[in-house]
């Protein structure tokens, strides 16, 4: 029995719709809300830290932090450096370095994927299976290059901030594409803390919001103490593998 291309397309679309409907029913109608039922409850300081850092990440999307559209207002005095697409020239998404005196923290917050900006797609798609070695594992080539570029550009700035504010912590964060770069930046910093001076143990941490998968499992386990991923149920980004992520989602 043979089928026309139109019949095959209709069958494929129907099958896809059925799978999506089943998934939605299971997640929303049966046990979706119980996914994290066995997890330990977050403490109040944990939630406060998530809220604080997520607001800084949101502020990277703002044209003016004093008149925000998405985030709560951020005091201009907290902004050490704000880097735009014109500054990064396609090497990395925009980012901002904050000095939070109240939290005694220095935060590098990186913007997520801009759907209409080709440079972000160039970073995301610059990867192939097993192409980029990192220590005893593998990493996403494009995002690792972006993290290296950011570190080379801002190492002296971070070092000066840490030296002038002893005892402060260093937090990296981002959303989507930016969170993957933040995670890799943290990994690079953790393996060479001398790049930014004498950072005490436990003072380096990454909060990655909806991160893509950017390293092989052995590296994820090795650096798990440094990186916290924040994921809402089954977002698509964490299911994007380090091997040609966008192509896998399309397929």
Image: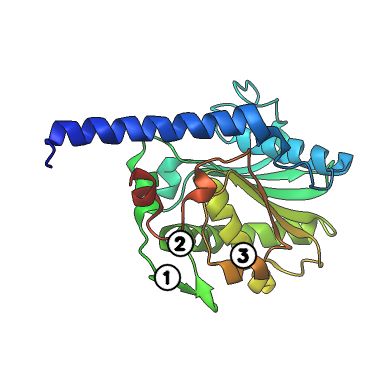
Mark seen at residue 140 = 2
Residue 149 position, x and y percent, is: 48, 60
Q: Which residue lies furthest to the bottom in this view?
A: 136
Lower position in the chain sequence, tag 2 or tag 3: 2
- Residue drawn at (61%, 62%) of the image: 155
Q: Nearer the viewer, mark 1 or mark 3?
A: 3
Image quadrant of residue 191?
A: bottom right
Mark seen at residue 108 = none
- Residue drawn at (62%, 22%) of the image: 68
In what element is the residue under mark 2?
loop
Q: Which of 14 and 57 is in front in this view?
A: 14
- Dot 3: within a 10 Å radius of its alpha carbon, few (fewer than 14), some, or many (20 or more) residues? some
Q: Label 2, label 1: how many angstroms apart (C-alpha)?
A: 7 Å
Are dots 1 and 3 in contact, CB under 8 Å? no
Q: How many labels does the image show?
A: 3
Are dots 2 and 1 in contact, CB under 8 Å? yes
Lower position in the chain sequence, tag 2 or tag 1: 1
Q: Which of 20 and 7 is in front in this view?
A: 7
Is residue 131 visible in the rendered image? The answer is yes
Check the image and report above or below for 180 versus 48: below
């Amino acid at each position: 029995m043979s089928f026309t291309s139109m019949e095959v397309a209709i069958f494929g679309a129907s099958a896809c719709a059925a799978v999506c409907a089943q998934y939605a029913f299971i997640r929303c109608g049966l046990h979706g809300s119980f996914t994290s039922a066995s997890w330990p409850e977050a403490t109040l300081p944990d939630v406060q830290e998530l809220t604080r850092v997520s607001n800084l990440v949101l502020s990277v999307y703002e044209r003016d932090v004093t008149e925000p559209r998405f985030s709560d207002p951020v005091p201009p005095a907290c902004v050490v450096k704000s880097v735009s697409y014109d500054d990064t020239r396609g090497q990395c998404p925009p980012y901002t370095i904050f000095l939070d005196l109240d939290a005694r923290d220095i935060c590098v917050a990186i913007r997520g994927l801009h759907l209409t900006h080709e440079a972000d797609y160039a970073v995301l798609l610059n990867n192939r299976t097993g192409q980029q070695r990192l220590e005893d594992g593998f990493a996403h080539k494009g995002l690792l290059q972006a993290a290296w570029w950011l570190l080379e550009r801002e190492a002296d700035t971070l070092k000066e901030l840490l030296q002038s504010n002893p005892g402060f912590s260093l937090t990296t964060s981002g959303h989507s594409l930016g969170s993957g770069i933040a995670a890799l930046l943290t990994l690079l910093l953790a393996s060479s803390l001398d790049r930014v001076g004498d950072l005490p143990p436990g003072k380096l941490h990454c909060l990655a919001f909806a991160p893509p998968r950017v390293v092989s499992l052995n590296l994820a386990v090795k650096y798990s103490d440094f990186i916290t991923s924040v994921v809402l149920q089954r977002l698509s980004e964490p299911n994007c593998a380090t091997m040609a992520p966008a192509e896998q989602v399309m397929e």
